[in-house]
Image (tube, rainbow, N blue to C red):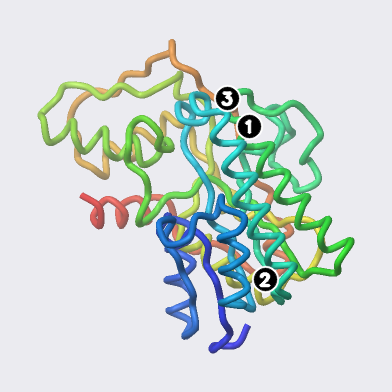
Amino acid sequence: MKLNSKIYVAGHRGMVGSAIVKDLENKGFTNIITRTSVELNLIDQNAVARFFEIEMPEYVFLAAAKVGGIIANNTYRADFIYENILIQSNVIHQSYKTGVKKLLFLGSTCIYPKMAPQPLKEEYLLTGILEETNEPYAIAKIAGIKMCDAYRDQYGCNFISVMPTNLYGFNDNYDLQNSHVLPALLRKFHEAKQNNEKEVLVWGTGNPLREFLHASDMANACVYLMQNYNDKGFVNIGSGKEISISDLAFLIKDIVGFKGNVVFDVTKPDGTPRKLTDTTKLNSLGWKYSIELREGITKVYNEKF
């Protein structure tokens, strides 16, 4: 990509897309195209076709998706598979039809098999049963990765895919009904502190292990791969470090300054027991994360609250 290349970032108002736009701008890219969902409904095939025919972007970051936590994924199962398949299919197909030079598709590590060996290597995809609570979303994302590879095989398109780990950062979703664990905990502890509550209730046993990456690091990796990776298959994006939900809760409690107790509701689901990415492939390409978890969460908390 040149600094004046025409770059379309789909999903620019979400945490992932906004971080990619910010990273591109920080690097001096000047021709970034964005559309809100009101301006361009990515589920509408004809609207997407018109947009690509008129704008003719050279590069595409496909960060648009319907996303959520355990509750949202399990409650709106039909919406998650339907909307995500339509969004990615429309953008990928029109990128092919209009001659986009390169496209980067974002998946998620939650699409690996539930009981896959740890850490998660790229080749473990489709080797086992998926986590039931987010199976529809996972199947949609797997379809997107395979679609990029199929268009590469049949048409020679330079479409690449990345698999980010759990992300947090500016512009995250803090809705307790459909957010991910880290922002949900930040909000819970903050409100408990504000209201002088005696305890914070955390879902599950606290035993599951999770990996987290700041969205700024993720965006930096995406732009790096857009400029340095041109092969079939996908690349994990992560820190390669993990923390238990219990330790995460106590870390957030400390950062927020909440003085009460932490109580774990063991009647609630834990989700996948462990989910750590193997970042060997990414590191071998010359990229490594830079923002440590305490530093990142502190920054996010100070920005949001």
Q: Which mark is residue 286?
A: 2
Q: Which mark is residue 145?
A: none
- In-front residue for pair 189/253: 189
Q: Quadrant of residue 124?
A: top right
Distance between mark 2 and mark 3 Cα atoms: 35 Å
Q: At 69% across and 67% down in the image, what residue appears?
A: 95
Query: What SS does tag 1 mark?
Result: helix
Q: Amino acid at mark 1?
A: Pro
Residue 147 vs 269, above or below: the answer is below
Distance between mark 3 and mark 1 Cα atoms: 8 Å
Query: What SS does tag 3 mark?
Result: helix
Q: Amino acid at mark 3?
A: Thr
Q: Quadrant of residue 130?
A: top right
- In-front residue for pair 54/260: 54
Query: What SS does tag 2 mark?
Result: loop
Place of residue 198 in the rendered image (x, y in percent of width and height, measured from the top left): 16, 21
- In-front residue for pair 57/172: 57
Task: Pick whichever of labels 2 and 3 is earlier in the sequence.
Answer: 3
- Tally the marks: 3
Place of residue 74 in the rendered image (x, y in percent of width and height, measured from the top left): 52, 25
Q: Amino acid at mark 2?
A: Gly
Q: Which mark is residue 133?
A: 3
Q: Which residue is mark 1?
A: 136
Residue 36 vs 122, above or below: the answer is below
